Image: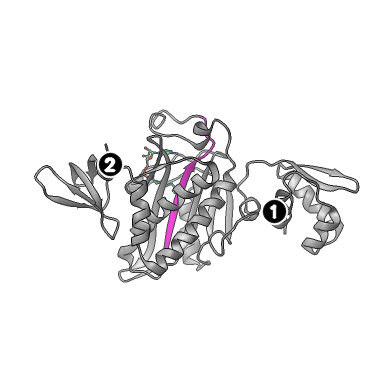
Amino acid sequence: MRSELLQMLLDHQGNFVSGEAISQHLGCSRTAVWKHIEELRKAGYKLEAAPRKGYRIIHQPNLLTENEIKAGLKTNYIGKHVVYEKSVSSTQEIAHRLAREKVAEGTIVVADEQVGGKGRLGRAWFSPIGTGIWMSMILKPKIPPQRAPQLTLLAAVAVIRGIHAATGLHCDIKWPNDILLKGKKLVGILTEMQADPDQIHSVIIGIGINVNQKNFPDEIKEIATSLSLEKGEDVNRALVMQSIMAEFEQLYELFLKDGFLPIKQMWEAHATTIGRRITARTVSGAIEGFAKGITEDGVLLLEDDFGTIHKIYSADIDF
Ligand code: BT5
């Protein structure tokens, strides 16, 4: 109910909404409305209450709790169930547990801080409190397990489009899972799954987005950036998240209906990796060559100087 109240106040963009209108809309008493208003105040909202006029929002804190995410969310199932935690080790771990407990498809786990945020191959993902979007999405696609990596690419397209819709900023994709803003890493995506050899139980897509950081630790300060560093002002995290979820749901529906091809084309339009000379550092060594494109499965095709085409399933890319 609190997210509906919030949505109503936000929809009025700083104008007053009468207590009567709110109580009718929510189907609760005026006293209950007042209690919800007090709860919003405790959460950091500045609300003005005026006799005969009602209530209006003066200041919205940059929160990512269930209320903020649901108020204004335009999806059918992605993000309809939100599990918010203030501080966790990794949202991936919680999502894995929930997936085993058979929660609904589209459930999102989001945290204000991760103290054990994970990248690929056991690397750490820096996730300081209150600054970024650290989220994991639970999907249950009826596709063979070998197609799961396509969802990483789909997520990258959804994030790029969502960020553009919410902020106007244009980002690029670096195969397979990085999103760059002016050449620096803005977003990391980690796809994991629970599956038998021939059947997926769930795919967990972890997305980490630097939103309002003003600085980074020494190890990554040369390679990382945030939305606010680029915009020169703080960015509302809930709006970015809602926008990404809406894009994701549309693309995911398209993917389930028409397959990977339309997603692949969108991905290619945003990819900086393709058509360039790159070095792919894989677990079995580095290969230099020309990035020709990706296959239907999202595998990178790299042509070395002898004309041999290598299929790269997982690697770090240097330009
Ligand atoms: C990734 O791994 O880029 C995937 C990151 C996924 C993070 C999300 S957050 C929500 C969910 N819960 C989790 O625990 N994880 C997911 P990889 O390609 O391996 O990149 C890791 C490397 O990126 C590190 O070794 C650093 O060099 C760099 N890095 C770490 N934190 C960063 C940050 N906040 N911004 C930019 N670069 C970062």
Report the magenta stretch's main SS: strand
C-alpha separation, residue under disc 1 versus residue under disc 2: 42 Å
Displayed quadrant of residue 290: top left
Quick check: is the Cβ at mark 2 less than 8 Å away from ligand 1? no
Instruction: Work out whether 297 lies above or below 54.
Output: below
Quadrant of the image where one finds ligand 1: top left
Q: Residues within 10 Å of mark 1 (few under 14, many from 20)?
A: some
Instruction: Work out whether 104 lies above or below 150.
Output: below
* Secondary structure of the residue carrying numbered label 1: helix
Q: Residues within 10 Å of mark 2 (few under 14, many from 20)?
A: some
Residue with the mark numbered 1: 7
Q: Examine the rendering and report whether any part of residue 120 can be seen.
A: yes
What is the x, y in percent for residue 289?
18, 42
* Secondary structure of the residue carrying numbered label 2: strand
- Residue 317 is tagged as 2
Instruction: Work out whether 127 lies above or below 220.
Output: below
| Residue under the image location 50 percent in, 45 percent down | 163
- N-term-proximal mark, 1 vs 2: 1
Quick check: is the Cβ at mark 1 less than 8 Å away from ligand 1? no
Magenta run includes residue 89: no
Looking at the rendering, the stretch of residues picked out in magenta corresponds to 203-214
